[in-house]
Amino acid sequence: MKFILNDRVVEETSLPSDFTALRYLREKRGLTGTKEGCASGDCGACTLLVGAIEEGEVTYSTLNACITPVQSLAGKHVVSVEYLAQLGEGLHPAQQAMVDAHGSQCGFCTPGFVLSLAGLYENSSVKEQNIDRESVCDAISGNLCRCTGYRPIIEAGLAMEGQQGHLLSQQDWLKTALADLDNPAANTKYLRPTSLAEALAAKKQHPEAEFIAGGTDLMLENTQRYKDFDVLIDLNNVAEIQQLEEQGEQLIIGAGVTYSQLENFSKSAYPHLYHLLSRIASRQIRNRGTIGGNVANGSPIADMPPILLAFDADVRLDKVDGSSRTVKMSDFYLGYKQTQLAEDECIVAFHLSLDKLAEFHRFYKVSKRMEDDISSVLLAARFTLNGDQMTEVRLAFGGMAATPIRVKAAEACLQTAKVTDDVALEKALQALREELNPMSDMRASAQYRLDMACNLVRKTWLELNGNTVPSFSGHPVPESWLSLGQEIGQQEGAKHA
Amino acid sequence: MRKLPDNLVTAQAAKALPIHESAMKHVTGEAVYIDDMPEWPNELHVATGKSTEAFADIVSINLDKVKAYPGVVDVILQADIPGDPDVSPVLSGDMLLAGDFVHYIGQPIFAVAATSLRAAKQAVELAEITYQSKAATLHPKDSLTRQEFVLPTHTISCGDSKTALAQAEHTLSSDLYIKGQEHFYLEGQISVAVPNEDGGVQVFASSQHPAEVQKLVARVLDLPVAQVLVETRRMGGGFGGKESQAATLGCMAAVLAVRNRCPVKYRMPRQDDMVQTGKRHDFWNSYQVGFTQQGEIVAAEYDMVGKCGCTADLSDGVVDRAMFHADNAYFLPNARISGYRGKTHTVSNTAFRGFGGPKGVLLAENIIEEIACKVGKDPLDIRKLNCYQTGKDTTPYGQQIEEDVLLTLIEELEVSSDYRARREAIKAYNKQSPFLKKGLALTPVKFGISFTSKHLNQGGALVHVYTDGSVHVSHGGTEMGQGLYTKVAQIVAKAFGIDYQRVNVGSTRTDKVPNASPTAASAGTDLNGMAALDAANTIKERLREFAVEHFAISAEDFAIVDDVVSLGTDSMGFPEFIKLAYMNRVSLSSTGFYKTPKIGYDRKAAKGRPFLYFANGASVSEVIVDTLTGEYKVTQVDILHDVGDSINSHIDIGQIEGAFVQGMGWLTSEELSWDDKGRITTNSPANYKIPTSADVPEKLTVKLFDRANGEETVYRSKAVGEPPLMLGISVWCALKDACASVCDYQLSPPLSAPATPEAVYYALQAAKAYQAGAIASEQ
């Protein structure tokens, strides 16, 4: 495989399939500026910038090197901290701003922050976007610092605004060099199919191989449990699973679509989805993790499945024998970490009805920490209305059972009720308490999960009745919530309190 | 954004202050941490086989498959350790490898050295170990019931608390369980050992206490201490977690290095680090307080049980410090404070920024919130009423509060943060807002500075001046990001009167400064800065004597200012003068030493002066809570903190902000969790959540309280490492205040620590239930 590492093309022919980019830089290249803080994609000390040509321009995004197989970076421009100061005279604006703002103390997390900020600087400069507090916090959402308390780092990020510095993407040699990288579809152990047919053929040939896309979950097996993966089939170049568009009466989300792609796509069209996506993992993880991966791993605490359940999504699965089938999301989960997805199958896409997407819906996530945390409880709710009459209700939860789950008994209580029928609501909540039997773990107690399941439905109900019930997110609290009388009509509130 | 008070540091002066000595290297990735050092081709890597039982006798161990695993070079058990396997810092019981029994899940039983970390980690999983389980004690409350302690109980008392309680107008009695905290230094524990040609060993350790690593490596290898050299250039964070427990890694690497005659690296992957190294102690505190209708405390009785884990480690000092801080800023005329060293079959808990202090301070602040609701006053009024002041200035252990700082500082912050107006606005908001509630709290901290183990209050330094006028400083302190090297270089530069850039602080080595104390207790600059100052002054005095003789001037005519040496009517540059001194055979090297004066604590009488002085501070936090879920945001924080005369305000403000956020994390999102077998379930950053940038309020103001230290510390500065961690308690109190709002502040509902959204939700439910009960009883 070939890629560009900082300022030169490198070629590797004998790396193990699961060899991470972090180990590669540190052990094979002596580039020790990239640190291992956790080896699980949670701390960002190993953050790298990775560039690829998109729509004719080189675009950079951040990722966690600790859980990224280096071979998945074939054809890309990989930038480590060592390179930034070599771009122009002196330090890169991100580095200079960190120094000026006293943004480092022990310094171990600093290279990761520098790269996250450098990526923000690069993208903001190229796209001529402002750097504000929200974009800085977004860029560093996957970077943990234990020393500074972040204030000086945020200040450093803001200080980059308007700075003149050399841009990675504007280096005259780069585009040609990237275009010239030829990467064969496969070496023997790390396979890079470019079509679904090739991917399935590869799986047929190597039944023991794992499919890998973002690898943000799979690679933890390798870095936390020390499991070796001999053969990996990288799905990132399979065109058929990258689809993300409204087609006819459906929204099609390819299994290979990343959270970041879906986030961009939903920003204006699906604000509630956009809002929730900002609560899933970190920027680095969202740049790599895919919607298909989130569903395929079968986790009961994954955040996308309840959303897909709420919209009655269909899942398209393709098999190595060339056959294809469609499974309803509501039938997809069989038990704890068990799904309909067979060993010899691959998720291609999720199909959602545009009509249903246009209906009233809300998503709420409760977790200990706002940014980059796993849900204690997640609710995805959808209400189909005919005037003030409900005709279809979906209440789908994560974190409440062995699988993502819809509570049909509770849905039934509301299905034919009026939106103002508080008795129906109480019945539905009672049904939730009867149907759900969540567990206690380090994230939340069973009791809290159950209470939240009910209160999140209550929140949705208040919104359904025209109230604005603020929900905290990782983003700053809007000023309007903090001033008097903006929150909710007082009478309504008093009624439901 | 933060602003410096104009009278303290002018913008220009602040700009002239040095940045962190490694800042440029941090941002370019050039700063070398131990794992970044080049590896030798024959270097081996360590992993340990861990106990799966909390308390058990080991029946059998079969390591055949481990030994046969590809890449494994050596496997050792306790019996293979040539010297004493006990690596306890102070007392005994911390075995490098377990012997006949295990006493926590995760305890190392055997160690593997392999050609790669991966091979070592894969190999250790293949061990077959059988156990005879025993009944484990997992909760500090149980250790109190069963009277299982790692060390004897200590009690401090003053006045007659029993009688005063009986006669008090009001009493409160309850308990508060305070969970511990994972250090989560970004650089995990690590050591590399390289054997030398004399049978000794050099150890590169990420340690806050290289001298102790040296001592313990010598002990496990049965070598003279002088045969062991330990070096620490920098740590990627320490926070107390690398004070005692870093030694295990150095010792293990050293034993395997000497056995195999090759360099050995022991780096704990994050999960091992979170399972195998100690944390901040949980504390179970029960309390009884008596107070007047005005809210003045007349009596207090506290029983404080620290969850020490399976061995003593540093727990004696930790529990003592919790007791010394149970008063926090408040005068207790009659008090009994008992501290128990609870033994549990869990990893041995250790130092963590604040060292027990935060458990005392949180207890005190919790009590204030409760008293305020009981007597129907603003908690700030209760704080000011009870605050140490003239006439109310003796601590329960008999130390006088000599500086009149606390109340002034609180009142200054009260005004600058606009506390009273915000309190009114919040009350009005809460009345009208059905789901969102705001809370506000101003909490002070008074933190005693000095090690409570008297002998540790000493510092050493070694200063060389070279013939070009450059200066090299070694001292016993270690750099973990807190800026100690920067401050010491500033101190030496100032002492000589030369440019800061001339001074180079080298890595901390046990062959430069011997027997150094740990860099802990916030005392790094106080001790090592003073020692370096002493060394610099010794050399400067020699230079003065030389100048007087050589130039026939009076002593007063000699001065060095801004790199220029004044010699009566003449002057010359510092390098030129140094060259001249050298040519005239003046010794240009000196050691320096410092021991903290005045301190002493009589343990038998439980009275004395454990601390040279107190560092003080206060913070105001405002929060907004979603009552439907318990989720919240911290919306504004104002801090005023006392660092004496600041040596480097950038570094001090960095310490204050960082400590505040770490303290906030301890009491909000960071929750340690253990299952009923004694297994820690929060073993990764995926399930243990330290704050992110989004948790820090945009409105964060930090000001330095402008007053010199009353004691003769180095340039009248004050220690800053730990005290501001307790400023985070204002967030917890503000959350409690928001919860109390739903019952119109008639009750300060019990709130767990940490106050996770779940904890806040149930505190709100308790307040609602109280309110409902109050209404029902009225009807």
Image: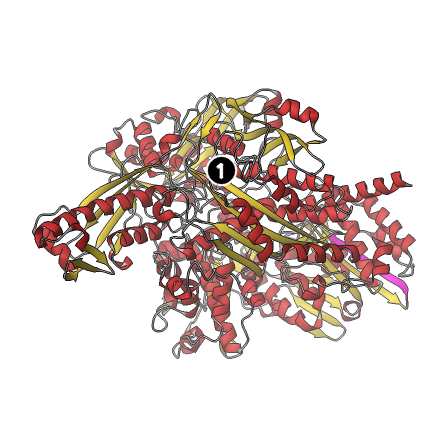
> On the image, numbered disc 1 is attached to which residue?
B401
Q: Main secondary structure of the magenta part?
A: strand
Q: What residue type is disc 1 on?
A: Ile
With B581 as the anchor, is B457 left or right in this view?
right
Chain of the residue on which disc 1 is drawn: B
Whether residue B589 is situated above or below residue A464 in the rendered picture: above
Whether residue B378 is situated above or below residue A33 in the rendered picture: above
Residue B718, magenta (yes or no):
no
Q: Label 1: few (<14), some or many (≥20) within 10 Å?
A: some
Give whichever of A365, B439 is nearer the camera. B439
Question: Residue at the location (73% across, 39% down)?
Answer: B374
Q: Residue A200: x and y, percent?
A: 59, 61
Q: Residue B738: x and y, percent?
A: 70, 49
Whether residue A213 appears in this view of the structure is no
Question: Residue at the location (55% across, 36% down)?
Answer: B391
Give whichever of B82, B90 is nearer the camera. B90
Give whichever of A312, B735 is nearer the camera. B735
Farthest residue toward the front?
Answer: B391
Q: Secondary structure at mark 1?
A: loop
Which color scheme did the rendering employ for the protein? Answer: secondary structure
Q: Residue A397: x and y, percent?
A: 74, 53
Whether residue A461 is situated above or below residue A158 in the rendered picture: above
Which residue range is magenta in the image? Answer: A388-397
Question: Residue at the location (62% across, 70% down)?
Answer: A264
| Residue B449, quarter of picture | top left
Q: Which image quarter is the N terminus of chain A in? A: bottom left
Residue A395, magenta (yes or no):
yes
With B40 as the anchor, is A71 left or right in this view?
right
Whether residue B705 appears in this view of the structure is yes
